[in-house]
Image (cartoon, rainbow, N blue to C red):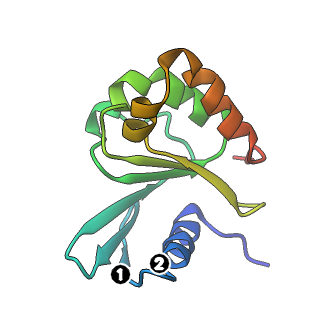
Amino acid sequence: MTELTIKEWAKTYVKYKDMIPRIVESISETENGIVVSQKTGEKITYLCMESIEALNPGSITNERIVCLNTKKNLDWLLKNWDLVKNKRTVFIFVNLDKAESWAINPLLHSAITEKKSLKQGLIALFESVPEASP
């Protein structure tokens, strides 16, 4: 059996999420991920990377970031929360072996969650999916 890459997983994820609305027009691959073109004219970029440690939080805008569900990636998100909490982006943490994931939109999450419970909440989400092997 061939193992999925994060990019292949992201394409499958997008197709699955589009089963009912049927708004995806095309999915094209880029060097760092995929771009989803919708019938509305909107394009959504998915950055696919095992580790987000080298990601510059200041360069994040409104893309989807797909990464492995590892403690290092969770730690990066916690450390950089204040820099990404006002961005229209979604982080998707995935375990490729188990085909399980969890996602968080920092902008929405910041609006509905108290800062003092942030770390506990993110750890609970992280632990809801088995940690991925890098």
Q: Secondary structure at mark 1?
A: loop
- Height in image: 113 above or below 32? above
Depth check: give the residue in front, 114 or 73. Answer: 114
- How far is mark 1 from mark 2, CA to CA? 7 Å
Earlier sequence position, callout 1 versus callout 2: 2
* Residue 78, disc: none
| Residue name at image x 55 percent, y 24 percent | 118
Q: Residue furthest left?
A: 41
Mark 1, other Cα within 10 Å: few <14 / some 14–19 / many ≥20:
some
- Height in image: 91 above or below 15? above
Q: Is residue 51 visible?
A: yes
- Height in image: 85 above or below 104? above
| Residue name at image x 69 percent, y 46 percent | 134
Q: Position of residue 42 (x, y in %)?
A: 23, 70
Mark 1 and mark 2 in contact? Answer it, CB < 8 Å: yes
Q: Residue furthest front?
A: 112
Mark 2, other Cα within 10 Å: few <14 / some 14–19 / many ≥20:
few
Which residue position is annotated with label 2? 18
Q: Position of residue 63 (x, y in %)?
A: 34, 53
Q: How many marks?
A: 2
* Residue 23, disc: 1
Q: Quadrant of residue 117?
A: top right
Q: Position of residue 124 (x, y in %)?
A: 70, 34
> On the picture, is 131 further left or further right than 125?
right
Q: Is residue 94 visible?
A: no
- Height in image: 82 above or below 90? above
Query: Split into 4 quadrants, where in the image is the N terminus?
Result: bottom right
> On the picture, is 19 further left or further right than 42?
right
Q: Secondary structure at mark 2?
A: loop
Q: Amino acid at mark 1?
A: Ile
Q: Amino acid at mark 2?
A: Asp
Q: Quadrant of residue 30?
A: bottom left
